[in-house]
Amino acid sequence: MLEVRAITVEYQSKPLFTNLSLTINKGEVVALTGASGSGKTTLLRCIAGVESIASGAIFLDHKDVTNQPAHLRRIGLVFQDNQLFPHLSVGQNIAYSLKLKRVDKKTIRERVEQALELVGLKDLASRDVTFLSGGEAKRVAVARALVAEPRVLLLDEPLNGLDSQLHAKLLKDLGELIRDRGITTLHVTHDQDEAGAIADRVFDLHQLIS
Amino acid sequence: MSQARTKYSNTAKLLTVLPTIFVLVFVIAPVANIFGKTFRDISLSLLRSGTIHEIIWFTTWQALVSTVIALALAAPVAFCVANFRFYGQRLVTSLTGIPFILPSIVVGVAFLGVLPSTLHRTAFALILAHAYFNFGFAARMIGNRWLQIHPYLDDAARTLGASPSRLFSTITLPILQRSILNTSLIVFTLCFTSYGVVRMLGGPSRSTIETEIFFRAMQLGDVSGAMLLSVVQILIIGSLFVVSTRFGSRDSRRASAPTISRQRRIDSTAKRFVVGLASLGAIGFTTAPLLAILVRSLRTSAGFTLEGWRSVATSTDLWRGLSTSFVYALGTLAIAVLLAIFASTATVFDERTAAFISVLTSLPIVVSSVSIGLGVLVTFDTPPIDWRGSQLMLPLAHAMIALPLAVRMITPVLQSIPAPLRQASSVLGANTWQTWRNIDLPIVRRSLVSAAAISAAVSLGEFGASSFLVRQNNETLPILISRLLSRPGDILQTQAFALSMILVVFSVALIFLIDTFDDFTPTNRAASDA
């Protein structure tokens, strides 16, 4: 369960939003919409712990993680532009979090294969990530986040920039993936249709500000 | 092939003729002559001499240690500049860029001024001066690559569980690896072929291959030995250059400019302390030797005096040196800029010509200035081409050394002009020359000024080729400084420091001129090449 309690975030010493609160129950999928520049991405980055908040608190499974560094939070973040590690192959990108945890090589290999199959990219483990198509790169980014077994998954405009056919296909696949695994998810998008397609609840960012 | 394409290819070929002739005559022919004479007439037994082994070994290890120290000093500066926004950042970047553009002899003189005399003529002095000369350049190279790492990559790693140290070892370092290796190779090459610094600080007991070439050719009269060493040197540098080029091209495939800056405001006392320490250390290390030159130009064993400066102002010899240097600098910039315009313009018309120009203008980098000097000396020594005493020979040699830099300043600007601009001009009735004059020239004008300034700066500080080619009546400033320092006497020493200070001021002024007109300072250019 994720609880964002009355947080205020500043950008260049000016408040971006104040007193924003949001609760997502375990296994629930929440979509968040809002105009460009309203602070949706920043909110995700604050929850993930890579951006700091001016005031308020963030709770994860009833534990205050406000001051916990990002690498200890176990919150997965799929970036709008994927941010795949350019010096690592597809398989190495997906295995990254497992290697950090010093999981044995055999298990890593199995988990990477499973993840690739899950996102429909079997046999691409050794591919250089700089040669992936937009859709393939997005799937690798999702697989990389899921393999880390996050307590909450944050999706930042995950289907942005894809053509309509691929968009529809990936949206369906992503929805099934999250639902099947019961992953608590916060999905940020500017597309109302996309928001409604996989979410239990949909909010506009301004609705969360008191 | 279309008619237009044939026309452009022909224009490109025509434009390459002049630069090709100059590089052929003043770089390739002298080097080929050295190689030819060495393999035809010279016994390779010199290479079995213990002294030569010692010299090659010393050259190698001092270059290795200098490289390691330069990189160690560069690392904190690169880290701070790439990751933080802080007060005085521009000052740190500008100041640390200065040592690399100083004439090498001035760096040597600076360390004579800053180090106690007991440390002169030691490996320590040499290594420290080499580290000083290269650390800002290394910081710029690595810092620029670091800046290209998207900050969200760090965030991605952190959300996947990477602690700061694991983030550095698994993401930052592997991405920087090629840049670090490439920088190391360049710095190693520069330390390996360093001449002015070694002549000033090494003395006879601390010889490198480069100074040994000079010593054998000009003082022992052993031109054969000098040529053999020159061949060894060119082969080593050539190999390093090929390796370095491969690293550079591989790294560029992975480099992509991030859409947001990774420089963040400093948000903790610990970070403030680290940035403060690195910045102050870098500023102190950069400025101390320069201040030492100034102080030593005003001080003799009897105390502070303006005698050194006064004699610079009144001595006919020194004035002649100054004017000779400036005349040669003017000649150099005229030749280098003219050739660079031809070479750079040719690259716009044809890809194969661009590749040819790139190789052609890289040759003077592979051949050290000392080897160019020696090559010219042994090649143009018989009538009707006995040009050794010609007043034109020095500006020509300097122009060959400046040409790679000048071309690399003009070419990117010319290549960045969109082809439709020229096509539009063509459609409106302009011929190739009119298009160049009305479209290319106004856009590239600022780069031409920068190329002229860097060519003048190279000429003013050039010491290697000049050591072989100057005569008593045409001594340049670096040669005068070297001669003054080799003689005993307080006033002569202060004169040498005063002349060095003049070179510092002119070099820095020229670089600020380039900074004003163009982003491609020598360090930026090299960093972007890498």
Image (tube, rainbow, N blue to C red):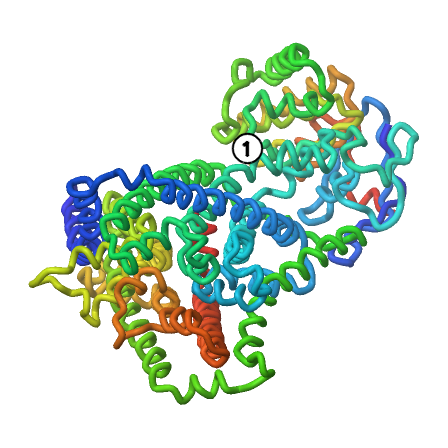
Q: Position of residue B318 (x, y in %)?
A: 37, 81
Q: Position of residue A101 (x, y in %)?
A: 73, 22
Quarter of the image for residue B411 reads bottom left
Which quadrant does the N terminus of chain A fall into?
Answer: top right
Q: Is residue B74 visible?
A: yes
Give the structural element (helix, strand or loop) at label 1: loop
Q: Nearer the viewer, residue B518 or A12?
A: B518
Q: Nearer the viewer, residue A145 or B50?
A: B50
Q: Is residue B29 above or below residue B280?
A: above
View extreme (left): residue: B384
Residue located at (42% from left, 54% from top): B194
Q: Nearer the viewer, residue B529 or B155?
A: B529
Residue located at (27% from left, 48% from top): B225
Q: Which residue is mark 1?
A: A86
Under mark 1, the amino acid is: Pro
Residue B221 appears left or right of A171: left
Q: Nearer the viewer, residue B343 or B173?
A: B173
Q: Chain of mark 1?
A: A
Quarter of the image for residue B317 reads bottom left
